[in-house]
Image (spheres, helix red, strand yellow):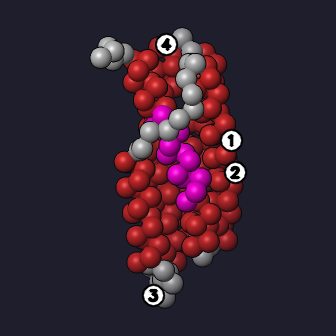
Amino acid sequence: MAEKTLQTLFHDTLRDIYYAERKILKSLPKMARAAQSPELKAAFEKHREQTEGQIERLQQVFEIIGKPARGKTCDAIEGILAEGDEIAEEYKDTAALDAGLLAAAQAVEHYEITRYGTLKRWAQVMGLKDAVKLLDETLQEESQTDEDLTAIADSAVNAEALQPA
């Protein structure tokens, strides 16, 4: 068995987030359809477009390390997305639906932020300057999306969720 190194861990984590991004890409249209707030729908649609670019950047990172772009099942994202589906079903047609969808989306964003932050740091340690730039670009997008979702929650969604349907 080959020795496990930071390079091995980097590759495994890259495969994990690649799988996660592809799953997220599939779930965003469903979340946009479920959302009641036009701002939240637009945020999900915007992030779908960003996610396509993030997947392309991940493919470039795979190229940099000389590995095929192949995902590895990410149980964490499977669980987070399943919770989002559960919220969409349980709170359908209620004032709290969008607040729940926002919370689920932010759980996804926070997971992505931790993964990209870690991958960026490891790429720095390994001297992968081009990978650092690509990972940082995605990290900045994920952080901005999280901030945008918070702004949508604060502007109306959370207050509206207090009202009975």
Examine the image and state in which quarter residue 13 appears: top left
- Who is closer to the viewer here, 143 or 14? 14
- Who is closer to the viewer here, 89 or 118? 89
The three-letter code of the residue at mark 1 reads Gly
**Distance from Cα at disc 1 to Cα at disc 3:** 39 Å
**Distance from Cα at disc 4 to Cα at disc 2:** 30 Å
**Mark seen at residue 53:** 1
The three-letter code of the residue at mark 4 reads Met
145 in relation to 66, above or below? below
Q: Earlier in the sequence, mark 4 or mark 3?
A: 4
**Mark seen at residue 39:** none
Residue 110 percent across, percent down from the top left: 45, 46
Mark 4, residue position: 126
**Distance from Cα at disc 1 to Cα at disc 2:** 7 Å
Regarding mark 2 in the picture, which secondary structure is present there?
Answer: helix
Mostly what secondary structure, the magenta segment?
helix
Regarding mark 4 in the picture, which secondary structure is present there?
Answer: loop
Query: Is 81 displayed left or right of 61 in the figure?
Result: left
The local crowd at label 1, few if under 14, some if 14 to 19, many if 20 or more residues have their Cα within 10 Å, is few
Q: What is the span of residues highlighted in magenta in the rendered image?
A: 15-27
